[in-house]
């Protein structure tokens, strides 16, 4: 098993790491991004996820499962073009959940599982 840290503030506070490589998979923790709106935050979260996957020796084309969590499901549609561009040729199984996030400033959190 290999643990990958991004050095983010929440990792130390909450006692987790950005990703864990185990059993032939890379499990990337729920990831939020910075930005003024849901699309900017989505793009930044995908960048952070991409870096974690690369540190694990894989990439976004190997993502088999993705979960999107948003406090307002009405904002999700604005992200669809970016998500289609990111995963379009290699679409993973996906779920969208409307729920509260760790801080009201966050508009989307993304969690993925990829082949190692």
Image: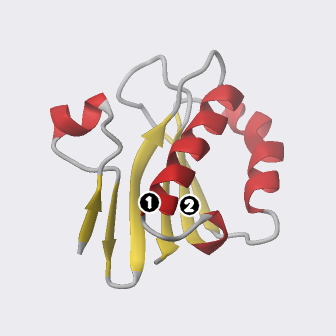
User: How busy is the neighbourhood of tag 2: few (under 14 within 10 Å), some, or many (20 plus)?
Assistant: some
**What residue is at 30 percent from the left and 49 percent from the top?**
5
- 21 to 75, vertically: above or below: below
Determine whether, in the image, residue 77 is placed left or right of residue 63: right
> At numbered mark 1, what does the secondary structure look like: helix, strand or loop?
helix
| Residue shown at 82% from the left, 53% from the top | 85
32 up-or-down from 3: above or below: above
Q: Position of residue 37 (x, y in %)?
A: 66, 20
Residue, far bottom: 24
Give me the residue at 60% from left, 45% from top. Answer: 46
Disc number at residue 9?
Answer: none
Kindly report the distance in space between the C-alpha atoms of the residues bearing marks 2 and 1.
18 Å
Residue density around tag 1, few if under 14, some if 14–19, many if 20 or more, within 10 Å: some
Give coordinates of residue 62: x percent, y percent: 60, 74
Which callout, 2 or 1, points at the residue further toward the start of the chain?
1
Q: Nearer the viewer, residue 21 or 98?
A: 21
Label number found at residue 55? 1
The quadrant holding residue 7 is top left
Name the residue: 56% across, 61% down. Answer: 66
Image quadrant where one finds the N terminus: bottom left
Depth-wise, is mark 2 or mark 1 nearer the camera? 1
Query: Who is closer to the viewer here, 27 or 108?
Result: 27
Image disc number at residue 66: 2
The reply, left or right, for residue 47 in relation to residue 80 is left
Circle 2/circle 1 CB separation < 8 Å: no
Residue 105 x, y percent position in the rendering: 48, 17
Q: SS class of the residue under badge 2?
A: strand
């Amino acid at each position: 098993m290999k643990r990958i840290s991004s050095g983010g503030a929440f990792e130390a506070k909450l006692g987790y790491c950005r990703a864990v490589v185990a059993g032939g998979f890379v499990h990337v923790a729920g990831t939020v991004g910075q930005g003024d709106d849901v699309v900017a935050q989505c793009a930044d979260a995908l960048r952070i996820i991409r870096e974690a996957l690369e540190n694990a020796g894989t990439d976004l084309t190997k993502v088999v499962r993705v979960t999107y969590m948003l406090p307002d499901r009405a904002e999700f549609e604005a992200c669809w073009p970016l998500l289609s561009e990111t995963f379009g040729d290699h679409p993973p199984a996906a779920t969208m959940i409307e729920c509260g996030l760790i801080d009201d400033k966050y508009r989307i959190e993304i969690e993925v599982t990829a082949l190692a």
